[in-house]
């Protein structure tokens, strides 16, 4: 069970915030952000595993990104631009009554997370960041221009092929037709099964509405392809401690791209994990354990150099 409340974003959009625990200011707060085409329920398994492993150690909160789940929809596409999404993170943190949060994010949530930790204002409110299957868009653009060896060329080629769906999502009308005809949902269901352990019982389906699919297209259309095609010469930096969980069978966001993105901050930690793009669903216990470890290291006050020794 979660306790839900509505938080007003700066532009008036209503954000549905769901607390899996009571909020105790003396405990570290983990704030989770879902990706496309999910809603906050993608974190249900993680929250349950974290509770079983670390009962009453953390505050755990997730929210529905604007246009998804129980959150309202912006008036136009500009409401999905990254600066606005970063402002949403800031507004949610304000609503929790805590000084800082440990950010955990997947897919488009992780793209938002990278934008937040490299933001001069919001980054100061984030104690740590655990990124799963989502790059910083500017670094993704730099990655595509980075190959200097045959192996690197192959890595870039694989990512270009894996990202081909993005160009389809940027087309007018066609993606909506494919979603309403259930083609896109079936494809995503199939991709979600990649890397799922056969020995485990089938997981409970994450509820995704048609609006989650349709509204989420604006994340792509409002923010792409400019940062990838023309990344700035000076890439944004962060001092926030970052952990990147790299799923071995992620065919949307390649391990090579995730490792490249993970090189942004000093003292970061890159951890290979089993599973595909939706490892957060297939392996919630692993995500819970590694997130708890990272939060604990940071919460103990280890310096970047001390964290590097722990890696």
Image (cartoon, grey):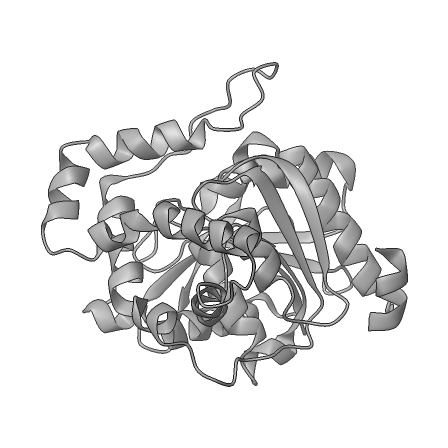
Q: What is the x, y in percent for residue 57?
A: 78, 49
Is residue 209 positioned above or below 72 on the image?
above
Above or below: residue 186 compared with residue 97: above
Q: Does residue 31 appear to the left or right of 169 in the view shown?
A: right
Q: Does residue 303 appear in the picture of this structure?
A: no
Instruction: Residue 97: give x, y in percent of width and height.
Output: 62, 70
- Kindly indicate the quadrant of the structure image that contains residue 259: bottom right
Residue at coordinates 15% horizontally, 55% vertically from top-left?
A: 171
Position of the N terminus, as image quadrant, is top right
The answer, for residue 145, to whether it is visible in the render is yes
**Residue 308, image x, y percentages:** 84, 64
The residue under the point 80% across, 64% down is 298
Q: Is residue 302 left or right of residue 46?
A: right
> Viewed as shown, does residue 258 lie left or right of 159?
right
Query: Which residue is most to the front?
Result: 150
The total of numbered circles placed on residues is 0
Between 267 and 159, the residue placed more toward the observer is 159
Spot occupied by residue 236 in the image (x, y as percentages of width and height): 54, 80
Quadrant showing the C terminus: bottom right
Residue under the image location 24 percent in, 73 percent down: 78
């Amino acid at each position: 069970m979660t306790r839900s409340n509505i938080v007003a974003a700066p532009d008036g959009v209503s954000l549905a915030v769901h607390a899996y625990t009571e909020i105790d200011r003396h405990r570290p707060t983990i704030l989770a952000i879902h990706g496309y085409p999910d809603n906050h329920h993608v974190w249900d398994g993680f929250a349950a595993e974290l509770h079983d492993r670390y009962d009453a150690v953390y505050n755990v909160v997730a929210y529905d990104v604007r246009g998804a789940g129980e959150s309202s929809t912006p008036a136009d596409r500009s409401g999905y631009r990254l600066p606005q999404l970063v402002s949403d993170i800031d507004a949610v943190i304000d609503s929790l009554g805590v000084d800082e949060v440990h950010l955990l994010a997947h897919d488009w949530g992780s793209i938002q997370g990278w934008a937040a930790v490299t933001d001069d204002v919001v980054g100061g409110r984030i104690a740590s960041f655990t990124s799963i299957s989502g790059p910083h868009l500017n670094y993704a653009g730099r990655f595509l221009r980075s190959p200097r060896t045959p192996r690197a060329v192959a890595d870039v080629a694989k990512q270009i092929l894996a990202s081909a769906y993005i160009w389809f999502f940027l087309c007018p009308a066609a993606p909506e037709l494919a979603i309403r005809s259930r083609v896109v949902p079936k494809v995503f269901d199939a991709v979600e099964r990649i890397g799922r352990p056969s020995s485990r019982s089938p997981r409970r389906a994450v509820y995704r509405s048609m609006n989650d699919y349709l509204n989420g297209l604006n994340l792509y259309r409002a923010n792409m392809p400019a940062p990838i095609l023309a990344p700035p010469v000076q890439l944004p930096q962060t001092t926030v401690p970052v952990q990147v969980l790299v799923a071995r069978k992620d065919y949307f966001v390649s391990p090579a791209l995730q490792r490249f993105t993970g090189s942004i901050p000093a003292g970061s930690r890159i951890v290979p994990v089993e599973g595909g793009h939706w490892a957060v669903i297939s392996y919630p216990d692993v995500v819970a354990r590694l997130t708890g470890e990272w939060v604990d290291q940071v919460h103990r006050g280890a310096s970047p150099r001390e964290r590097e020794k722990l890696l």
